[in-house]
């Protein structure tokens, strides 16, 4: 059983239906975008007993602003369909994603719904990158070609440490394990001088 197993709250049914529509034809990490959205939602449920349905709905729809048709006012549609909380969480996640392009992205851990969705998103995205790297047969080479990502590892570690007392221990440990593996690979890249 996962947070997406029936019977589920109506808000999650609606979010899953909208995610299917908006994710159609899009990919994230070389897989259908819906797979990423579902994994983020399920990851929250694996670590948080009885998570608020709005958090699961936001997890399913967190990439909607990037995937929905450009002519659509996504936040208006989300507010009308889900009330204020789901689009608020999504907007915070989008701001966090955009901030990763800045020199020193801020770390915010004071908003529990956003923190849970953000932590799950990082677990899923980074785990997916590790899976893709293993599939190439050259993990070091895969990450050597992604210096921006490797440069963000200290930020992700600082996020994990700041989030640690505020998320379930199992969720923090999950992110810690993924980051430890990535840090190990990055250290290998530096020591080998791979470019």
Image (spheres, rainbow, N blue to C red):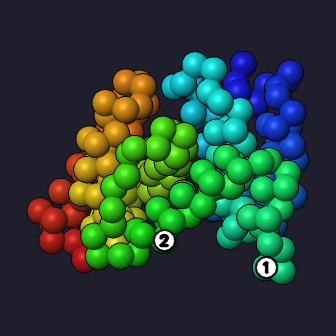
Q: Quadrant of residue 110?
A: top left
- Front one among 191 and 116: 116
Q: Is residue 64 visible?
A: yes
Q: Which residue is mark 1?
A: 70
Mark closer to the chain start, 2 or 1: 1
- Left of 116 or right of it: where is 4? right
Q: Quadrant of the C terminus?
A: bottom left
Residue at x 60%, y 61% (from the top left corner): 91
Neighbour class for label 1 at 10 Å: few (<14), some, many (≥20)? few
Front position in the image: 81 or 64: 81
Question: Dot 2: within a 10 Å radius of its alpha carbon, few (fewer than 14), some, or many (20 or more) residues?
Answer: few
Where is residue 97 drawn, in percent x and y? 49, 65
What residue is disc 2 on?
98
- Residue drawn at x 84%, y 80% is 71
Where disc 2 sits, the SS reads helix
Residue 24 horizontal/vertical position (percent): 83, 62
Quarter-wise, where is residue 187 in the image?
bottom left
Left or right: where does residue 46 sit relative to residue 105?
right
Asked if 115 appears above or below 194 in the picture, the reply is above
Residue that protrudes farthest toward the front in the picture: 84
Q: Position of residue 51 (x, y in %)?
A: 62, 27
Which residue is at a point 25% across and 50% down the rendered structure image? 158
Cα distance between the residues tagged 2 and 1: 18 Å
Residue 177 as seen in the image, left or right of residue 58: left
Residue found 78% across the figure and 56% down from its top: 79
Whole-percent x, y for residue 8 in the image: 82, 26
Looking at the image, is 146 positioned above or below residue 156? below
Question: Tag 1, which secondary structure?
Answer: loop
- Height in image: 61 above or below 117? below
Instruction: Give the number of the disc on residue 61.
Output: none
């Amino acid at each position: 059983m996962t947070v997406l197993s029936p019977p589920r709250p109506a808000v999650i049914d609606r979010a899953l239906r909208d995610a299917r529509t908006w994710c159609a034809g899009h990919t994230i990490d070389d897989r259908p975008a819906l797979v990423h959205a579902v994994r983020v939602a399920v990851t929250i449920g694996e670590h948080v007993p009885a998570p608020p349905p709005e958090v699961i709905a936001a997890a399913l729809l967190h990439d909607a602003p990037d995937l929905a048709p450009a002519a659509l006012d996504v936040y208006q549609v989300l507010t009308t369909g889900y009330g204020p909380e789901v689009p608020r969480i999504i907007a915070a996640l989008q701001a966090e994603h955009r901030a990763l392009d800045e020199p020193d992205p801020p770390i915010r851990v004071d908003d529990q719904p956003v923190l849970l969705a953000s932590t799950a998103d990082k677990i899923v995205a980074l785990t997916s990158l590790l899976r893709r790297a293993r599939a190439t047969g050259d993990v070091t080479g895969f990450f050597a070609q992604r210096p921006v990502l490797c440069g963000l590892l200290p930020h992700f570690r600082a996020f994990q440490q700041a989030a640690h007392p505020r998320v379930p221990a199992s969720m923090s440990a999950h992110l810690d394990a993924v980051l430890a593996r990535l840090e190990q690979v990055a250290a290998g890249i530096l020591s080998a001088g791979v470019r």
